[in-house]
Image (cartoon, rainbow, N blue to C red):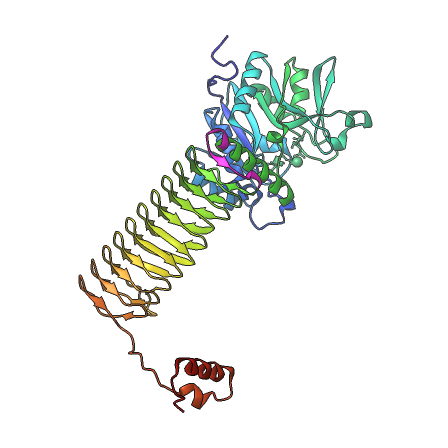
Amino acid sequence: MSADQTGSAPSPVAAVVVLAAGGGTRMKSATSKLLHEVAGRPMLSYAVAAASALRPDHLVVVVGQLKEQVLAALEAFGAGVETAEQPEPLGTGHAVACGLRDLGDLTGEVVVTYGDVPLLEGDTLVDLVSTHRRESAGVTILTADVPEPDGYGRIVRDHGEVTRIVEHRDASPAEREIHEINSGIYVFDAQILRAGLAGLTTDNHQGEQYLTDVVTYCRSVGGRVATMQIADTIQTEGVNTRVELARMNAVRNRRLCEKWMLAGVTIIDPATTWLHDSVDLAPDVTILPGTHLYGATSVSSGATIGPDTTLVDCVVGENATVIRTHGQLAEIGPGASVGPFSYMRPGTILEAGSKVGAFVETKNAHIGEGAKVPHLTYCGDAEIGEGANIGAGTIFANYDGVGKYRTTVGRHSFVGSDSVLVAPASIADGAYVAAGSTITNPVGPGELAVARGQQRNIAGWVARKRAGTKTEEAAQAALAEDGTEDVR
Ligand code: UD1
Ligand code: CA
C-alpha cells in the first residue's frame, strides 16, 4: 500500500477550491451566510480547516456576493488562503473556473468543496483523496444516500458505473427516484477538470455552467468516475436558512459535548449545555444544565460549572465552583466559589479559595487568596488582600462621573456591611470599617474607621406623630409590658 491509504496523511493535493460566492439570500441577513457562526466560529472557517487537512499547494476561496465581508473575515482566520472572485454567479462550474484562473497549469488533484458545509471533517476529505488515488479515477464524488433527495443532483449509474450527475430540475421522473445524491464535494484530476470546464455549456434548466457536467466529460475521454459514499450524511449538508443553521449548531454542539464526555467531562444535560469549539475542559469537570461556555474559556479538573451559567473567555481553576453566574474575561482560581447570581466582568481575578457570592458584581477586581465578597456588593476597580472580608451590601464607589479610581482593602481587613468605599480609598492591612460607613479617608493598619451619623433616639415620637396607628398601639403595649410610662 502506498502512503496515501485511508487514515494516513496524504501527500498534498495541488489545490482545494472552496466555493463561497453565494451570499445566502434565504438567510435574509445583511451578513454573508458564510460568516454566520456554528459553535462560535464562522461557517466558512470550518471549510477552510477541513481543506487545510489536505495540505494543498493552493487553498482558494471563491468569493462573490458580500465579498468585502468574506475577505475581511478571511484576514482573521484564513492564514495562507488565496482568494479569487467570481463576479457573477453563473454556476458552480464557472465558480471553479474562477478559482483556478490564477493558478496556472496544475498537475495532480483539485478538490472542490463548499464554504457552507460546517460539519464536513478534514478526515473525510483525506479519505476521499485516498479513494481517488486508489481507484486511479479522473473524478471522485462524495455521495450520500438520503431519504429525501429532492433538490440535489442525482448520481446516475449504468451497471454500477457512474455515467453522469443530473440536477433535480433537469431529471426525469425515473431519475428523481434515485436516492444517491451528489454532495458537491469532489476530487478531480487537474487536467480533466480544466479541459472539462473549458467545454461547459449553459444548456440546462437553470442556464448555468454546471460543474457536474465535468463528470460526463471525464467519461467521454475515457476517465474513471469513482464515488465514496458517506454514512454520516450531515457532513455534506449545507446551510441555506437560519432553521438549518440552528440544526447544524445543535448537531455540532452535540458532537462537541460527546467529545468532551468521552474525554472525562461529566455533562448532565448535553441538550442545554452549549460549548464553543474553542473551549478547553479537563477530565472530571462537571457541567450542570443550562451552562454556556464560550470563547477561550478553559476549566480545570474537579471544577463544577452551573446550573445556568455563562462564561465567556474565562479561566476556571481546579475544584472551583461557579453557580448561576455570568462571567466574561474573568479568572477564577483553584477552589474559589462563585455565585449564585454573580456577575463577573472583565478583569476579575479570584485567587485560590476566594469567594464571590450572591448578587455581587465585580469588574477589574483582584480578590486575594481566601478573601470573601459574599453578598450584594458592587466591587469595581478593587484590590482586596488575602483573607479580607467584605460585608453585605458594600459598594466600591469607583466612578465620580469623570474618572474611575481604584480602591485597596488590605490583608485580613474587615469591611462592615453597607459601607461605601469612595475611590481612591485605601484600607490598610488588618483594619476594620464599621458597618454603614462612607469611607473617604485612608484607614491605617489596626484602625477601626467609623464614618456615619451618631444615633439619636427621640422618645415618644411615635405617640406624638403617629397617634392612633397600629404602630402606636404596639408601642404602648410594649411600654406597658416593660412597666415604662407613656412619655407623651
Ligand atoms: C450543487 C450541485 C448538485 C449538488 C448540490 C449539493 C451543481 C450544478 N449542482 O447544487 O449536484 O447536489 O450542489 O449541495 O453543481 N456557488 C458559487 N457560484 C455559483 C454557484 C454556486 O460560488 O455561481 C456556490 C454556492 O455559494 C454554494 C455552492 O456553490 O456554496 C453550491 O451552490 P448551490 O446553488 O447551493 O448548489 P446547486 O447548484 O443547487
Ligand atoms: Ca444548494
Residue 425 inside the magenta-drawn segment: no
Residue 269 inside the magenta-drawn segment: yes
State which quadrant residue 119 falls in.
top right
Is residue 392 left or right of 439 when viewed as pictured? right
State which quadrant residue 76 falls in.
top left
- Taking the spot 42% from the left edge, 55% from the top edge, the residue there is 343
Residue that protrudes farthest toward the left in the picture:
445
Is residue 434 left or right of 323 when viewed as pictured? left
- Taking the spot 65% from the left edge, 24% from the top edge, the residue there is 143
Foreground of the two, 251 or 2: 251
Foreground of the two, 77 or 84: 77
In percent of width and height, residue 480 lies at: 43, 83
In percent of width and height, residue 445 lies at: 17, 61
Is residue 276 left or right of 347 when viewed as pictured? right
Range covered by the magenta-colored residues: 261-271
Q: Is the residue 486 above or below the residue 218 in the image?
A: below
The quarter of the image that holds ligand 1 is top right
Foreground of the two, 332 or 39: 332
In percent of width and height, residue 260 lies at: 48, 33
In percent of width and height, residue 149 lies at: 72, 30
